[in-house]
Amino acid sequence: MSGKIFVIGIGPGNLDYLTERARAVIQLADVVVGYKVYVQLIEELIDRQRVLVSGMKQEMERVTEVVELARTGLNVAIVSSGDAGVYGMAGPIYELLSRVEEEIEVEVIPGVTAILAAAASLGAPLMHDFAVISLSDLLTPWEKIVTRLHLAAKGDFVVGIYNPRSKQRHQQLVEAQKIFLEYRSVDTPVGILWSSTRAEERRLITTLDKIPHEEVNMFATLIIGNSESYISGDVIVTPRGYQR
């Protein structure tokens, strides 16, 4: 008899933001599997569990190992930062299981995503329709990302930006900024949050024309306001229209 696979979103990194269900399942699992940095974030919850960690770009290897372990009857928890269904491991798990013959039970446990954690720290920027776009072209062609940026900007969505800039990728954020400036004013609010909810958390509220590119890295999440968003004191507000 097969075990069960738990695909767990561990939130932005602070265990205070881990759901009770996620905490319970991690502690009851036979095996915990994940990217080494994410496993380190929950290490105080690990006691008797077997732990298997791996590096970046080894997602399919992790998923294959999880399925093999579940086949032997073990209950396996695979962890993702944020929510496992948002740029996380839920997709690869289901993709692999769709290609195998036997049925293995899967439970996806939601977590607080980076965009929600950032929004909470920045005020109320997501009060109207919004989109989230990753600038990483590792798995998605840059041409398709550019199309999505144009459509989101033209549609006046509030836009969250994941994976804005890395050591190897400098130009994508520059190009994204130029695209948004085609559709929005220079004083459109932009909020940036680094290492959300962790001890090293840092926040900045600025405008679309003043994004500090050199300071932005893979630990940052950006939120670009829509045409009605405004800065009030030290927060960003996007009106929903209740006062009308």
Image (spheres, grey):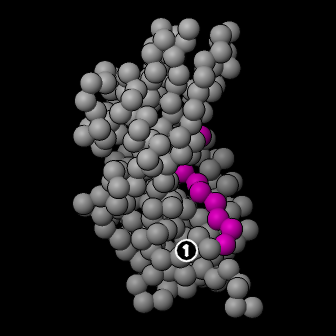
Q: Quadrant of residue 139?
A: top right
Mark 1 packing: few (<14 Cα in 10 Å), some, or many (20+)? Answer: many
Task: Give me the residue at 59% from left, 70% from top.
Answer: 126
Q: Is residue 133 magenta?
A: yes
Q: Is residue 47 magenta?
A: no
Foreground: 220 or 176? 220
Q: Secondary structure at mark 1?
A: loop
Identify the image quadrant of the C terminus: bottom right
Task: Give me the residue at 70% from left, 85% from top.
Answer: 242
Residue annotated with mark 1? 125
Foreground: 113 or 179? 113
Q: Quadrant of residue 17?
A: bottom left
Please tell me how many numbered marks the rendered image carries: 1
Image x and y of residue 184, in percent: 63, 77
Task: Give me the residue at 35% from left, 33% from top.
Answer: 27
Foreground: 31 or 136? 31
Task: Give me the residue at 65% from left, 15% from top.
Answer: 103
Q: Is residue 220 above or below residue 139?
A: below
Which residue type does callout 1 highlight?
Pro
Q: Is residue 148 above or below residue 26?
A: below
Q: Is residue 116 left or right of residue 24?
A: right
Image x and y of residue 42, in percent: 31, 41
What secondary structure do most residues of the magenta stretch adopt? loop
Image x and y of residue 72, in percent: 47, 8
Magenta stretch bounds:
128-140
Foreground: 83 or 174? 83
